[in-house]
Amino acid sequence: MIPIVLVHGGGLDGRCWDRLLPELDGPALAVDLPGRGAHPAPFGEVTFAACADAVRGDVEVAGFDEVVVVGHSLAGCSLPSILDALGERVRHAVFVACTVPDDGRSAFDMLDPSIQQMIRDAGDLQPRPMHPAMAKDHLIHDFCPASPEEVQPVLRLSQRRGKPENQPRPHHPHRPHKPRPPDRVPARC
C-alpha cells in the first residue's frame, strides 16, 4: 500500500491527524511544517520552500519511495511547493477543504476585503494558543455528541506542550478505539 503523508493546515501541527491515523490501514506520516512541533522556527522565517524541504526530509527519513500527499485547509498554500519537492514520489495529491490562492496571490489576498480590513485594524497579531472556548466552537462542533470527559482532552490540545501521549485521547463513542499498528510512523511533537 502506498504511504500517506498528511499535511496540517494553519495554526495546527501534525497532531491534528491523530484521530485519523489509527483508522488508516497502511503506513502514514503526519508531518509538522516549520514553526510547529518537530520543526521549530520563527514564524517570520517560514517559507513555502522551508515547508517543502521539511516534508521532503521527513519522507526521506521515513523511507517512503512513493506517497499520497493529503493536505488540509491552509496546507493548500504550501502543497504546490511540497509536491514539487517530492517530485516523482507523489502518486496522488488530495486537497481537503484547502485554501488555494490564485497564482501570484496569497491566502490573505483571497479574503473578502472587509475581512482583510478587520485583520489590518487588529494591528500586529502574534501567534498564540487558541482560547478553549474558541477551540470548542471552531474545532469540536462537527464531532458527534461527547461527554465533558471526552471533550476536555481535545480542548487542552491548544494549550499544552509535550507529547500527545501525555494526555488521554478522546475517541468516537460509537467506535472502539484501535491501537496504532506498529508499522505506522507516528506524528512527532
Image: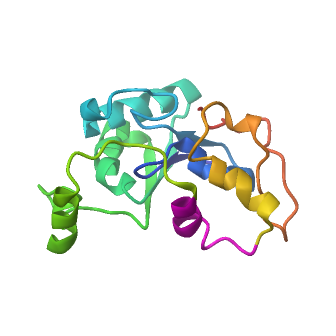
In percent of the image, x 75 and y 75: which residue is there?
Answer: 145
- Residue 128 image position (x, y, % from top left): 42, 43
User: In front here: 56 or 2?
Assistant: 56
- Res 49 visible: yes
In percent of the image, x 60 and y 72: which residue is there?
Answer: 141
- Res 3 visible: no
Q: How many labels were placed on the picture?
A: 0
User: In front here: 64 or 188?
Assistant: 188
- Residue 107 image position (x, y, % from top left): 24, 58
User: Which residue extends farthest left?
Assistant: 104
User: In front here: 60 or 51?
Assistant: 51
- Region rendered in magenta: 133-145
Quarter of the rendering containing residue 15? top right
- Above or below, comparing residue 3 to residue 62 in the picture: below
- Above or below, comparing residue 65 to residue 127 in the picture: above
Quadrant the C terminus occupies: top right
Q: How is the image coloured?
A: rainbow
- Residue 81 image position (x, y, % from top left): 28, 43
The answer to whether 69 appears left or right of 79 in the picture is: right
In percent of the image, x 22 and y 59: which residue is there?
Answer: 119
- Residue 68 image position (x, y, % from top left): 50, 50
User: In front here: 23 or 109?
Assistant: 109
The answer to whether 186 appears left or right of 55 in the picture is: right
Residue 134 within the segment the image draws in magenta: yes
Residue 6 within the segment the image draws in magenta: no
User: Which residue extends farthest right?
Assistant: 176
Quarter of the rendering containing residue 162? top right
In percent of the image, x 46 and y 35: which residue is there?
Answer: 36
